[in-house]
Image (cartoon, rainbow, N blue to C red):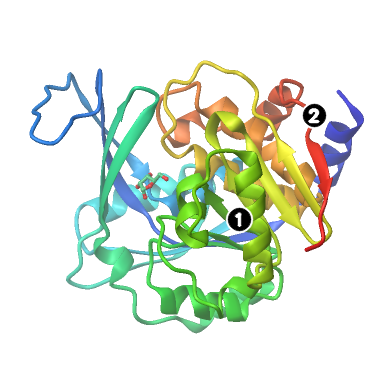
Amino acid sequence: MDTATARALDRSDRRPAVVVLGSINLDVVVELAHLPVPGETIIAQHVRRNVGGKGANQAVAARLAGADVEFVGRVGDDANADMLRNGLEAYGVGNRHLHAVDGAESGVAYINVADHDNTIVVVSGANWAWQQADADTDALVAAADVVICQLEVPDDVIERTARLTAGRFVLNAAPARPVSEELLPCCDPLVVNEHELAFLSGREITGPSEALTAQAELMERGARSVVTTLGSDGAVWTAPGEQGVQPAPRVDVRDTTGAGDVFIGHLATRLGSGASLGEAVRWATAAASWSVQVAGTHSAYPDLAQAAESLHLVPEPVFHPSSS
Ligand code: RIB
């Protein structure tokens, strides 16, 4: 075990308190020989139903990475709600703040997996019918080491949460939609993939160097730090005075669904344990590359020891000084 691994594992004696406020869905997944084109009908051999949603995925990933995790979210008053609640509990994620919305249906995501890629259609249901905050949740958010949100729940809920966060606020700006000027300065880091970065920056992102330029602009607009995942090109990050490129290891990709969520769960947990952004990106890269080799979401997520095993496959990062 190298020194960086040993140091990170040492720090994880103290389990960071992570709150994930976000979406939870029933994922209806079919594996196909290729993704359908418009007008095409494809026959699949079987369908898999599992707990998903970017929020729930990130919560389970953070828990497996070694954090104490509470999930804050909304389900419907339908038959799927219990399955979603139990799916969090099975991994030891706290679900006391997962409330049912009267008259709403739980979120459902329809996912096609093929060609090392996927398409996802989300019917948000209760995730989007979120109106009232509760005082208990406010106290939980204020006490957390790290709070993680995504963009699958209403902006008001996210902005209120960011204002209440006293620890570190991590925003996964997915799926792509605008991030308000009020929210951007709370993000430490803002985490995006290349499509979301292109959307937020208005630039074409074809690789690490364009991503670093776009990240520098987001820092000028107020973000405290930014991380971009680039699939097989790895990830890049920008923090005050430093930029870095973290190449990904070469692995056999089977299913990338939720790989970004694994990345964020591990990233946030390492940050909560005191790692630098560069160190946390390296661990998150190891964890995500482990998960894409296995089909499924939560069942394909590595724990801390498995991420540590993959760490030696992850190439050394390249650091760049930066003026931001
Ligand atoms: O990031 C993957 C997730 O996006 C899926 O689990 C799906 O539910 C959608 O929210």
Residue at the image position 50 percent from the left and 21 percent from the top: 293
In the rendered image, is residue 32 in sight? yes
Locate residue 118: give its quadrant.
top left
Q: Is residue 81 toward the left or the right of residue 99 in the image?
A: left
Q: Which residue, given by chain and number where applicable, does mark 2 sit on?
A: 316
Q: Position of residue 318 (x, y in %)?
A: 80, 36
Locate residue 129: give its quadrant.
bottom left
Q: Is mark 1 within 8 Å of ligand 1?
A: no
Q: Amino acid at mark 1?
A: Ala
Residue at the image position 43 percent from the left and 51 percent from the top: 54
Q: Nearer the viewer, residue 115 or 135?
A: 115
Q: Nearer the viewer, residue 62 or 289?
A: 289
Above or below — where is 282 with respect to 45? below
Q: Position of residue 216 (x, y in %)?
A: 68, 59
Q: Which residue, given by chain and number where applicable, does mark 1 sit on?
A: 214
Residue at the image position 12 percent from the left and 24 percent from the top: 42
Q: Is residue 206 toward the left or the right of residue 316 in the image?
A: left
Crowd tier of the residue under label 2, counting other residues whose Cα lies within 10 Å: few below 14, some 14–19, many 20 or above: few
Crowd tier of the residue under label 1, counting other residues whose Cα lies within 10 Å: few below 14, some 14–19, many 20 or above: many
Q: Amino acid at mark 2?
A: Glu
Say which quadrant the N terminus sits in: top right
Q: Nearer the viewer, residue 68 or 289?
A: 289
In the rendered image, is residue 67 in sight? no
Q: Is residue 139 toward the left or the right of residue 179 in the image?
A: right
Q: Position of residue 36 (x, y in %)?
A: 19, 29
Say which quadrant the C terminus sits in: bottom right
**Of helix, strand and loop, which one carries label 2?**
loop
Q: Nearer the viewer, mark 1 or mark 2?
A: 1
Looking at the image, do the residues carrying marks 1 and 2 touch, with CB atoms under 8 Å apart?
no
Q: Position of residue 12 (x, y in %)?
A: 79, 45
**Of helix, strand and loop, which one carries label 1?**
helix
Mark 1 and mark 2: Cα distance apart in space:
23 Å
